[in-house]
Image (cartoon, rainbow, N blue to C red):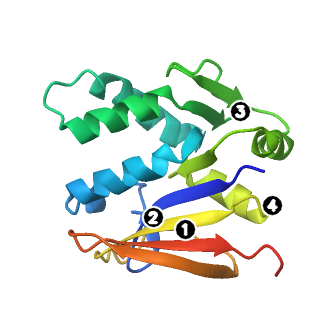
Amino acid sequence: MRRIVVSMNITVDGFMAAPDGGLDWHMQNWSTDMSDLLAEQLNNADTILLGKNTYSAMASYWPAVSTGLLLSRGDLAYATMINSCEKVVCSTSLKRPRWENSRVISANVRREILKLKQQPGKDIMVYGSHRLVRFLSKFNLVDEYLLWLYPVIIGRGMPLFHEQQKLAFAGAKTLSSGVVVLKYRCNLNG
């Protein structure tokens, strides 16, 4: 069975976004080793599962970036990878996804995600998508969390977790920017 891997930026005080959903706090720490690790993780996946808001933001950015002449070779390779991956959007309001290789799940979401996990293939990555992550967590559909812990405190915002979960530590990597990527496997047995 394929794994669902949630890759999420979080602050030291546990928020994934500012109260208004803003993410400007994470751009100041961006580094090339972060790009390399992100590309390595995406290389282990062939599907990206997203909520509508995150999908819309990514769909307005990544297709245009892939033709950018000012990108590093690594960023250009990442743009090519993300554009070629299958994108599955969980939304009741999005009807026509415009990003290539995209489709929408609007009904029987849990059943459709379970079917997606049972198909042959690589990992299924989830980026951002706060409400979707809460849904996946509620139904024990997340197999692994990659938490990109930023050396930033924002005081208040949107917390990633809303209820108790048992996780098993599976490793950590410190990046040159001070961001620490924490890997946790979900303990679905309790």
**Percent position (x, y) of residue 36?**
31, 52
Q: Which of 188/171 is in front? A: 171
**Percent position (x, y) of residue 73?**
21, 36
- Element at label 3: loop
All told, the count of numbered labels is: 4
Q: Which mark is residue 160?
A: 1
Q: Amino acid at mark 2?
A: Met
**Percent position (x, y) of residue 156?**
41, 74
Q: Residues within 10 Å of mark 3 (few under 14, many from 20)?
A: few
Q: Which of 33/55 is in front? A: 33
Q: Amino acid at mark 3?
A: Thr
Q: Which residue is mark 3?
A: 92
Q: Amino acid at mark 1?
A: Leu
Instruction: Estimate the spatial distance between the alpha carbons at disc 1 and disc 3, rounded to whole Å.
Output: 22 Å
Q: Which of 94/88 is in front? A: 88
Instruction: Estimate the spatial distance between the alpha carbons at disc 4 and disc 2, rounded to whole Å.
Output: 20 Å
Instruction: Estimate the spatial distance between the alpha carbons at disc 1 and disc 2, rounded to whole Å.
Output: 6 Å
Q: Residues within 10 Å of mark 2 (few under 14, many from 20)?
A: many
Q: Which mark is residue 139?
A: 4
Quadrant assignment, res 149: bottom left
Quadrant assignment, res 141: bottom right
Mark 1 touches mark 2? (CB < 8 Å): yes
**Quick one: label 4 or label 2, which is nearer the N terminus?**
2
The mark lying in front, picked from 2 and 3, is 2
**Quick one: label 2 or label 3, which is nearer the N terminus?**
2
**Quick one: label 1 or label 4, which is nearer the N terminus?**
4
